[in-house]
């Protein structure tokens, strides 16, 4: 009964809504930077569904308008083409700061721009949060642990990061973004939240963005060999996007600054991932070995005890359950197969 007053898009007025957590309040005004991207667009869906007013700021570097098409006519939604490296004036209650290319191929394309986005972009969003007294959530990354010497990675681990390597623009950039967030928190009393996100996959990932799950799935669907870099024994832990979005919202609404690891502890070697893709798409899909990229972390797996305890959060979708949902989306986008779409 409590939730029957929950307002969804299209309902006539009320400015007073009940959000699923049972919190009564004014409709929240929320900025999502990077909201046209993979994770951001799924987050926007949930916020709009909850009854919030959402402004997306995105420079469309890796984002796509298609990800947000279904909201464009909604009066509670606004898309602003803007680069977070430049200042902006807005009045909102919360800022989810996601703007930053996430695929190594994209963030290495113009490394100086990646650093500017992480440093100047985050500074601007924190300056905005300070001026309007908004709550600010940073989407940091498991990359802050670098090539980790501790396994699994706990939030208290400081990491093993090369400051001058080809990945540094991203991982050092995110480390500075975390530092800035904590300094605005301590110095200016801004309410900040920090999420360290582990590899995430799902519908709407860019088909050719070069990340491993999107590569393998697109390759298997196109009947091309799956490209395994190095010996394929390096590991990653893959989280389905809906689990991540749930974690981000709990973190924003909760009382804890973090940082919190948000990831699925299920750990796979790249060869094992290729096998799961074979089982899901085509058991005859071939594997082709390629030289690995520089500074590739050997292993990665989140310890999520802190998020379990303090946010009451844990992932619920395994790789074998999540992958088919991504495959039908990719099939639809690659071949226009209408039966394939889940979104
Ligand atoms: P994505 O590339 O799909 O989305 C990033 C969005 O940010 C895009 O829409 C892009 O156009 C926008 N953007 C980039 N630079 C910008 C700028 N200067 N100004 C405005 N907009 C800009 O990536 P994603 O996977 O959705 O990642 C979202 C966030 O989550 C990123 O901050 C990323 O670092 C973080 N993250 C993601 C993963 C993952 O596995 N997907 C893992 C760790 C961290
Ligand atoms: N900023 C912004 N929007 C605002 C307020 C600030 O983009 O509403 C930017 C501002 O241009 C500055 C950065 O955020 O570059 C940091 O702002 P802050 O007020 O913390 O620092 P200062 O302006 O004093 O350097
Ligand atoms: N990888 C691979 N084949 C590909 C793309 C990536 O084997 O086509 C490997 C890559 O070397 C890394 C892992 O998959 O060890 C994850 O790479 P991704 O770019 O998805 O994310 P990262 O965790 O490195 O940011």
Image (tube, helix red, strand yellow):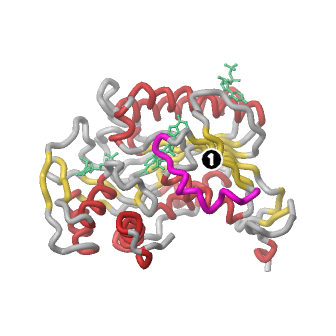
Q: What residue is shown at x 72% (from left), y 59% (from top)?
A: 74
Which of the pair 212/218 is nearer the observer? 218
- Residue 144 in view in this figure: yes
User: Residue 111 in the image: x percent, y percent?
Assistant: 38, 29
Which residues lie in the magenta part? 61-75
Q: What residue is shown at x 35% (from left), y 68% (from top)?
A: 335
The answer to if 65 sits in the magenta stretch is: yes
Image quadrant where residue 217 sits: bottom left
Which of the pair 77/132 is nearer the observer? 77
User: Residue 245 in the image: x percent, y percent?
Assistant: 55, 59
Q: What residue is shown at x 25% (from left), y 41% (from top)?
A: 296
Q: What residue is shown at x 54% (from left), y 62% (from top)?
A: 313
User: Residue 67 in the image: x percent, y percent?
Assistant: 53, 57
The answer to whether 152 is drawn above or below residue 172 in the figure is below
Residue matched to label 1: 32
The answer to whether 236 is drawn above or below residue 177 in the figure is below
Quarter of the image with the N terminus is bottom right
Q: Residues within 10 Å of mark 1 (few under 14, many from 20)?
A: many
Kind of element beneath mark 1: strand
**Position of residue 279 in the picture relative to residue 334 (left or right):** left
**Position of residue 143 in the picture relative to residue 292 (left or right):** right
User: Residue 90 in the image: x percent, y percent?
Assistant: 75, 37
């Amino acid at each position: 009964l409590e939730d029957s007053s929950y307002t969804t898009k299209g309902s006539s007025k009320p400015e007073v809504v009940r959000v699923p957590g049972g919190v009564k309040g004014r409709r929240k005004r929320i900025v999502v930077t990077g909201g046209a991207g993979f994770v951001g667009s799924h987050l926007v869906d949930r916020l709009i569904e909850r009854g919030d007013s959402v402004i997306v700021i995105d420079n469309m570097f890796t984002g796509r308008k298609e990800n947000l098409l279904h909201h464009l006519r909604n009066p509670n939604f606004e898309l602003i083409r803007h680069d977070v490296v430049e200042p902006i004036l807005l009045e909102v209650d919360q800022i989810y700061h996601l703007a930053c290319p996430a695929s190594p191929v994209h963030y290495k394309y113009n490394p100086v721009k990646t650093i500017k986005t992480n440093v100047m972009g985050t500074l601007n969003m924190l300056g905005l949060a300070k001026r309007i007294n908004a709550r600010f959530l940073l989407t940091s990354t498991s990359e802050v642990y670098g090539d980790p010497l501790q396994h699994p990675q706990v939030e208290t681990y400081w990491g093993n990061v090369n400051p001058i390597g080809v990945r540094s623009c991203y991982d050092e950039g995110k480390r500075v973004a975390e530092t800035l967030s904590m300094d605005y928190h301590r110095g200016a009393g801004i309410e900040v939240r920090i999420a360290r996100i582990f590899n995430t996959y799902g519908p709407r990932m860019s088909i050719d963005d070069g990340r491993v799950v999107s590569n393998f799935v697109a390759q298997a669907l196109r009947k091309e060999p799956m490209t395994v870099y190095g010996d394929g024994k390096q590991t990653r832990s893959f989280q389905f996007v809906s689990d991540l979005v749930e974690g981000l919202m709990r973190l924003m609404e909760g009382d804890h600054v973090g940082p919190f690891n948000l990831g699925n502890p299920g750990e796979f070697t790249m060869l094992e991932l290729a096998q799961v893709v074979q089982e899901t798409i085509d058991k005859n899909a071939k594997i082709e070995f390629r030289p690995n990229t520089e500074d590739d972390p050997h292993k990665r797996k989140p310890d999520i005890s802190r998020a379990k305890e303090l946010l009451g959060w844990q992932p619920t979708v395994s790789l074998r359950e999540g992958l088919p949902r991504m495959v039908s989306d990719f099939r639809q986008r690659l071949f226009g197969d209408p039966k394939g779409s889940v979104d």
